[in-house]
Image: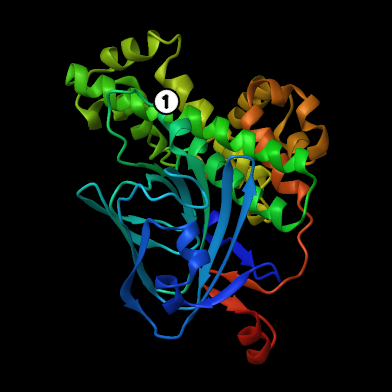
């Protein structure tokens, strides 16, 4: 969906500092008191940031012209964003994350949700920008079982629900950059929180059921499938063989929820196509190429499945006026997708200097230095 190549506009509203000042500047300390700068950065390199308040949320962007390591230190200090927050963060370059005894590579465009009271170390190997949404901890706590510790959630970037969350977070920031009216901006924020809540419920249910029964549960199977949707060999038999259960067991897992495995695979593949057909990154790809990239092996089968699911053919959908999507049959079954598409297309992008793919782009070195 092109999330890995998103850029951040260096607008006049950005505050510019030397990275060294992170340790001492009162404004930075009040916004992020739980963060501590590591020693891995270029002395004197620039840090740009901007935070905007939306009701009880804070939306922010940081951008640096240097590789950087930082540490979240568990704290209960009161800050400008509240005593305790959960942060949904998406970088535009990969970073290594150490949290809760685990180390993994967070990909560009992938979101993770962490707690300000959870120790975390994030390390970037190159200049970067990141978008973050700070959410009151009590709100996120309400999405998870009370008896389970919250050590952060890695949302991934392969499933359609994760991609929608990334798309909405980027759209929320762009709506702020564009100075959109509050109803539009708050609408995007509400859609993002709703998608995030659903994702948290699903991931919590997967962990809880798996631990209780000591066996594979439906949500774990779905995660396995979501990671392999583009593989044309993906089938009920292949899933059963790879996770070590019978096809009968898989069918029974999904039957409890009124589903079947093959229909779930097809629906998630269609949702992936739904996003790519309206993504400008794939404008030069044909409908058939997009369908085949999501594991379909017949253009006719894809077209008939698409029409049966969404009430229109793929070509009609691709050319549909995005402002009218909410009143189309598509909105009844894919409201989150439609909201994400609307939020993206609402923003009229202007030519601005940007922090793109970890480096700032502009016409001259002097202008570049003045901006950051």
| Residue 370 place in picture, x, y as percent | 65, 85
Who is closer to the viewer here, 112 or 227? 112
Q: Give the color scheme: rainbow, by chain, secondary structure or one colour.
A: rainbow
| Location of residue 243 (image quadrant) | top left
Q: Quadrant of the C terminus?
A: bottom right
Is 117 above or below relative to 127? above
- Relative to 104, is 284 on the left or the right? right
Who is closer to the viewer here, 197 or 210? 197
Q: Is residue 87 visible?
A: yes
Q: Residues within 10 Å of mark 1 (few under 14, many from 20)?
A: some
Who is closer to the viewer here, 271 or 301? 271
| Location of residue 306 (image quadrant) | top right
Is 193 above or below relative to 119? above
Q: Residue at x 58, y 77 (%)?
A: 360
| Residue 214 place in picture, x, y as percent | 17, 21
Q: Secondary structure at mark 1?
A: helix
| Residue 86 place in picture, x, y as percent | 43, 43
* Residue at numbered disc 1: 201
| Residue 296 place in picture, x, y as percent | 52, 36
Please tell me how many numbered marks the rendered image carries.
1
Is 255 above or below relative to 110? above
Q: Residue at x 68, y 74 (%)?
A: 353
Q: Is residue 221 visible?
A: no
Q: Residue at x 30, y 56 (%)?
A: 73
Q: Residue at x 80, y 45 (%)?
A: 181
């Amino acid at each position: 969906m092109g999330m890995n190549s998103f850029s951040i506009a260096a607008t006049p509203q950005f505050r510019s500092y030397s990275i060294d000042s992170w340790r001492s500047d009162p404004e930075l300390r009040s916004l992020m008191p739980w963060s501590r700068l590591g020693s891995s950065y270029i002395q004197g390199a620039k840090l740009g940031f901007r935070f905007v308040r939306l009701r009880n949320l804070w939306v922010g962007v940081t951008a640096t012209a240097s590789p950087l390591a930082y540490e979240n230190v568990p704290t209960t200090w009161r800050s400008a964003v509240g005593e305790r927050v959960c942060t949904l963060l998406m970088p535009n370059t990969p970073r290594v994350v150490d949290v809760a005894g685990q180390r993994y590579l967070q990909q560009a465009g992938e979101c993770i949700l962490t707690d300000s009271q959870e120790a975390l170390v994030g390390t970037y190997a190159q200049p970067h920008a990141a978008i973050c949404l700070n959410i009151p901890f009590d709100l996120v706590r309400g999405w998870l079982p009370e008896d389970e510790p919250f050590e952060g959630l890695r949302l991934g970037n392969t499933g359609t629900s994760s991609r929608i969350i990334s798309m909405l977070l980027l759209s929320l920031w762009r709506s702020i950059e564009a100075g959109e009216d509050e109803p539009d901006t708050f609408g995007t924020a509400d859609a993002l929180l709703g998608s995030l809540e659903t994702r948290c419920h699903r991931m919590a249910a997967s962990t809880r059921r798996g631990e209780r029964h000591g066996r594979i549960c439906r949500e774990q199977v779905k995660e396995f499938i979501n990671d392999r949707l583009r593989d044309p060999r993906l089938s009920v038999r292949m899933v059963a063989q790879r996770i070590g259960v019978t096809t009968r067991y898989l069918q029974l897992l999904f039957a409890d929820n009124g589903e079947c495995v093959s229909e779930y695979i097809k629906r998630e593949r269609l949702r992936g196509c739904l996003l790519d057909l309206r993504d400008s990154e794939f404008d030069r790809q044909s409908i058939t190429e997009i369908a085949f990239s999501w594991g379909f092996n017949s253009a006719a089968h894809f077209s008939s499945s698409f029409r049966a699911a969404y009430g229109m053919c793929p070509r009609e959908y691709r050319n549909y006026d995005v402002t009218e999507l909410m009143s189309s049959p598509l909105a009844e079954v894919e409201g989150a997708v439609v909201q994400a598409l609307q939020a993206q297309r609402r923003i009229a992008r202007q030519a601005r200097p940007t922090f793109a793919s970890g480096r700032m782009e502009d016409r001259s070195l002097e202008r570049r230095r003045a901006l950051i």
